[in-house]
Amino acid sequence: MTLLAFLSIIFLGFAVYNLSCAIVDVPTKKTSRMMLLSRRQQGIKNEKLLDVYITKIAGLLAPLLRLDRLKRNKLHRAITIAGLELTPEIYTARAWVTAAGVGLCALPVAFIMPLFVPILIGLAVALWFSTYYAAFDYVKKRRKLIESEIPRFALTIGQNLENDRDVLKILTSYRRVAGKDFGAELDQTIADMKTGNYENALLHFETRIGSPMLSDVIRGLIGVLRGDDQRMYFKMICFDMRQIEQNNLKKEAAKRPKKIQRYSMMMLICIMIIYLVVLCVEVLSSLGAFFG
């Protein structure tokens, strides 16, 4: 009877899925694959077929969402930096659709294996957080990578100012040795400087990154554009950045013993579980022989 109910739920879910796809006009699997292949040939990053379906459903639910203006602007900035071609409403709806898809699986499971319902609900909540904050995590990691390169950037500027004060030439020269993320930002800044005002391009560069360390560098570069002698200024900020870098390294070194201690504790718990299982098996076998 349980097997018959389980098969009935599977066939019902399959029928509801196909009916829903027909109602909301979701493309077929073959059509979606051809669309993905076309996007890859155009140089657009790879996408999974499931993401296409989720985005399609999220696009239908997006008009129902009302986001706070401040929260929407913050989310829009993170999505833009992450390179996602989505509106904040669709991005938020994607998180809800992903979580709801796992959460709804708890309904049929409740009739078959009720103990798995809390696990699925917990997984749905975890998926919502991981999906919604994925863009913010990307921005955080990217900013960390860029900030790790700023001290070298400032040092290079200070050295170049000894011979040349052409800011565009200095940035173009450093672009050859810049990292991937920092280089992409420099490309945009250089393009803005070539097509517009130098000072505005540097201010936009500062706004996009949002790093206090970069703000100090941009302040010095703007001073160079205005004709000030900023050689001593860059020597000072290079010294300050070196101190900050050393402090960060000390903090990372201080974290390592704690990580090792945590892993050691986990290993100890695993060893105790192994001994406990062996002990329980021996006790049960002894009890069986005793009562037998």
Image (tube, rainbow, N blue to C red):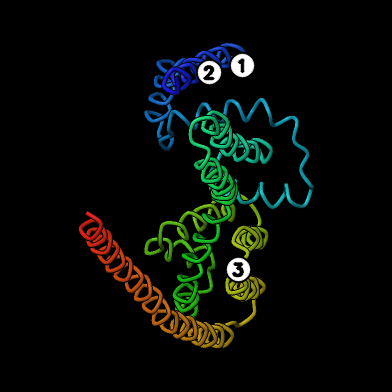
Residue receiving disc 2: 17
Observer-side mark, 3 or 2, equals 2
Q: Residue at x 22, y 62 (%)?
A: 286
User: Going from the N terminus, do you reach mark 1 or mark 3 first?
Assistant: 1
Q: Which disc number belongs to residue 14?
A: none
User: Counting other residues with Cα less than 10 Å from the Cα at mark 2, is it few (<14), some (14-19), or many (20 or more)?
Assistant: few
Residue position for label 1: 24
Q: Quadrant of the N terminus?
A: top left
Give the residue number, with chain letter if any, for mark 3: 211
> Mark 3: which secondary structure?
loop
**Closest to the observer, 282 or 263:** 282
Q: In the shown orientation, is residue 232 left or right of residue 70?
A: left
> Which residue is drawn at the image coordinates 51% and 54% (left, top)?
138
Q: Position of residue 92 (x, y in %)?
A: 65, 41
Q: Are marks 1 and 3 in contact (CB under 8 Å)?
A: no
Disc 2, SS: helix
Choose between 181 and 271: the one closer to the eye: 271
Residue 182 image offset from top left, x and y in percent? 47, 60
224 over 93 or under it: above or below: below
